[in-house]
Amino acid sequence: MACNLAYGDGPMTVAQLFACVRHRFAGLSAYYLKERDVIAIPLSDAAAGEAAVFLRELAARKGLSCCTVTAAWPELAGPEIISLDGASEFLVISGTDR
């Protein structure tokens, strides 16, 4: 299972991290944009606070990029996610080559 990769020292892909998010934070709104290899998590979600701290640390440890962006990025996420969730800020995790 991908969540087991969170405990080791080795690298982790964005897809593996998304599987871990879905397993560990089952009630969290999270979107995996496969064509861009990006995870977007609305920070307006009540469960996002605890998850964001954990995921920022995990992403850094696993060699992934992590940042907070505003809803002014429809070219990255697509308007369907922004309008679906209504969030203004997202935690975005991607590979380091982005």
Image: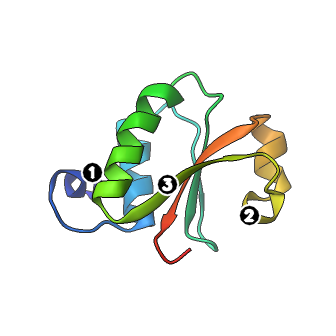
Residue 69 or residue 82, whichever sits in front:
69
**Mark carried by residue 76:** 2
Dot 1 or dot 2: first in sequence order is 1
Please state the horizontal and vertical placement of residue 27, each as a whole percent of the image.
50, 30
Q: Nearer the viewer, mark 1 or mark 3?
A: 3
At numbered mark 1, what does the secondary structure look like: helix, strand or loop?
Answer: helix
Q: Of the residues shown, which amino acid type is indicated by label 3?
A: Cys
Q: Of the residues shown, which amino acid type is indicated by label 1?
A: Cys
Which residue carries the number 3 mark? 66
Quarter of the C terminus within the rendering? bottom right
**Mark carried by residue 3:** 1
Q: What colouring method underlies this structural image?
A: rainbow
Q: Of the residues shown, which amino acid type is indicated by label 2?
A: Leu
At numbered mark 3, what does the secondary structure look like: helix, strand or loop?
Answer: strand
Q: Nearer the viewer, mark 1 or mark 2?
A: 2
Residue 53 or residue 85, whichever sits in front:
53
Q: Nearer the viewer, mark 2 or mark 3?
A: 3
Q: Are marks 2 and 3 in contact (CB under 8 Å)?
A: no
Q: Are marks 1 and 3 in contact (CB under 8 Å)?
A: no
- Which residue is at a point 36% across and 49% down the rendered structure image? 20
Dot 1 or dot 3: first in sequence order is 1
Quarter of the N terminus within the rendering? bottom left
In the image: residue 36, left or right of residue 3: right
